[in-house]
């Protein structure tokens, strides 16, 4: 029984290691160009949870949680954005996965 519990704990740690969380700030022409909507659509397709919003200083801020590979894909999307966006800077801070979100939403 102890061995089985130990194996289960190890599997849980491996699964957690495959999860990631990123806090992202995107600068440039990123508001009014469907940045939030296209990011949300991609996040839903990739099964990434979190949120995205416009900030008062003209940037877009987002938190992504999910499979590490999918979170990385979203961060990469933010480096280019949708067709009418002109991204000048992306700040991505990698954090420990928390699992606090149920879905992905646009915050206002």
Image: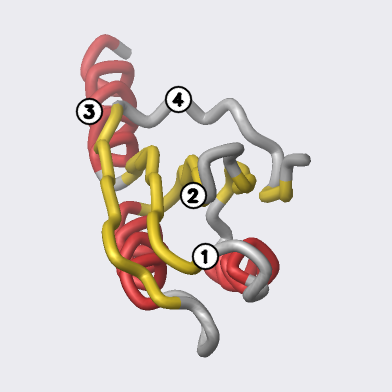
Labels 2 and 1 touching (C-beta < 8 A): yes
Foreground disc of the pair 2, 3? 2
Asked if residue 59 can be seen in this view, the reply is: yes
Labels 4 and 3 touching (C-beta < 8 A): no
The mark that comes first in sequence, 2 or 1, is: 1
Residue that label 1 marks: 30
The mark that comes first in sequence, 2 or 4, is: 2
The picture quadrant where one finds residue 72 is: bottom left
SS class, disc 4: loop
Crowding around mark 4 (Cα neighbors within 10 Å: few <14, some 14 to 19, many 20+) is few
Foreground disc of the pair 3, 1? 1
Labels 2 and 3 touching (C-beta < 8 A): no
Labels 4 and 1 touching (C-beta < 8 A): no
Residue 98: assigned label: 4
SS class, disc 3: helix
Crowding around mark 1 (Cα neighbors within 10 Å: few <14, some 14 to 19, many 20+) is many
Residue name at image x 69 percent, y 68 percent: 37
Asked if residue 40 can be seen in this view, the reply is: no
Residue name at image x 62 percent, y 43 percent: 51
The mark that comes first in sequence, 2 or 3, is: 3
From the image, which quarter does the N terminus lie in? top left
Residue closest to the far top? 2
Residue 74 located left or right of residue 51: left
Residue 10: assigned label: 3
Residue that label 2 marks: 59
The mark that comes first in sequence, 4 or 3, is: 3
Query: Where does residue 29 sit, x and y in percent of width and height?
Result: 48, 68
């Amino acid at each position: 029984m102890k061995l089985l519990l130990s194996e289960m704990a190890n599997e849980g740690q491996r699964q957690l290691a495959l999860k990631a969380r990123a806090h992202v700030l995107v600068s440039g022409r990123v508001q009014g160009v469907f940045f939030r909507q296209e990011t949300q659509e991609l996040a839903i397709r990739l099964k990434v949870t979190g949120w995205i919003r416009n900030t008062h200083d003209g940037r877009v801020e987002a938190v992504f949680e999910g499979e590490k590979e999918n979170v990385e894909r979203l961060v990469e999307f933010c480096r280019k954005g949708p067709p009418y966006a002109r991204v000048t800077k992306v700040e991505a801070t990698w954090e420990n996965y928390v699992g606090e979100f149920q879905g992905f939403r646009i915050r206002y």
